[in-house]
Image: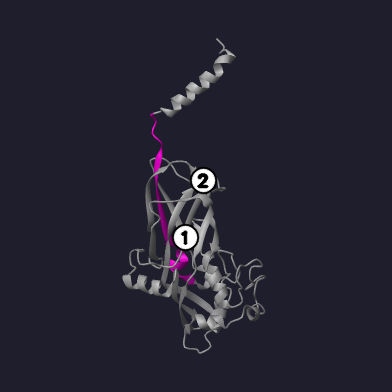
Amino acid sequence: MPVPRSLFPALVALLLLAGCFSTEPTPLGVVEVETQGDISIEEGLEADSFADARTSSITFDRFLVHVGAAGLGETSATAIPLAGAPYVLVDHALPGSKIVVTAPDVVARRWGGFTFTVNPARVSSTLGGGVTEEDRRAMQQKGASVRVKGVAKSAGAMKSFDWWFLQVLSYGDCTVELPDSGSATGLLVRPAYRNEVPIVFSGRPLFDPILGAGARSGRHLRFDAFADADVDTNGVITESELRRVKLSDLRVGPGLEAGSYAPEPDAERPIETLWDFVSEQVRHTVRLGGRGLCTSNRFQ
């Protein structure tokens, strides 16, 4: 029998009221945000990564990153911190993933915004495995969020570096890969499941002459400009030496691909020296999972 038109409002109200008293539990899942270095950090970069024939390898002794404040929301702008949004100081030169935060009882659904931050270490930071209190104290005294220490073999000589980066980097509007090779913005939290969210760092962008290209594979990297910056030939490449190298001088070098050592036209801060360049590349060392990407903002 058809329902009389006059009864439709009452029927709708009854259905809504029934929904309010529904005893169906909200589906929940666990979100575990992890971070790790890729093979370029854990095992180093070999000769087949470099466009300049002088460089045979780069290995990282330390790749300290202070990362945390992970959040979820309808959008990145409205993301809510997960489980208190802790920070952890990790060394990605050590193999394996490191937990940033484990958040239980997250509503299972697709969230449009996932965010996290890299910023200077603090006294309250959790120390990841292999990271010492001395590491944290040194990072805090320097005001550093990232420390990169390593050794390169260039033209048969050993060149070491130990660089401290003071950036505040905010990441959001992340996209993740889908099984069908597509991508989607945000994260899908599945119910009754431990949803692992890997934040992956790579050492490749630090030595890529194309700003913002990310962790691209192949023979694109160049260390020759860094090696040449060691003007006192003591085998140590310092920040002050990199600050003396003008990008305008590097762009006229032989064998460079188009766009090498060119600053972004809309850069918020001048990128004029090799130190400016590698400092800006730090924010492009991050991706989400295998090939997921996030937009980043640098505040220092």
Secondary element under disc 1, as helix, strand or loop, is strand
**Measured from the top left, where is residue 170 in percent x and y?**
51, 60
> Label 1, on which residue?
117
Q: In the picture, residue 271 is in which quadrant?
A: bottom right
Closest to the observer, 230 or 270: 270
Q: Based on the picture, tell me whether residue 158 belongs to the magenta stretch.
A: no
The local crowd at label 1, few if under 14, some if 14 to 19, many if 20 or more residues have their Cα within 10 Å, is many
Query: Can residue 116 be seen here?
Result: yes
**Which disc is residue 74 wearing?**
2
Q: Which residue type carries mark 1? A: Thr
**Measured from the top left, where is residue 288 in percent x and y?**
49, 56
**Measured from the top left, where is residue 65 in percent x and y?**
43, 66
Q: In the picture, residue 207 is in which quadrant?
A: bottom right
* Way the structure is coloured: one colour
- Decide which of tag 2 and tag 1 comes sooner along the chain: 2
The stretch of residues the image draws in magenta is 23-45
Q: Is residue 126 above or below residue 102?
A: below
Closest to the observer, 262 or 125: 125
**Which disc is residue 40 wearing?**
none
Residue found at the far bottom of this picture: 232
Q: Quadrant of the N terminus?
A: top right
**Measured from the top left, where is residue 245 in percent x and y?**
58, 82
Closest to the observer, 262 or 9: 9
Q: CA distance from mark 2 to mark 1?
A: 18 Å
Q: Which residue type carries mark 2? A: Glu
Secondary element under disc 2, as helix, strand or loop, is loop
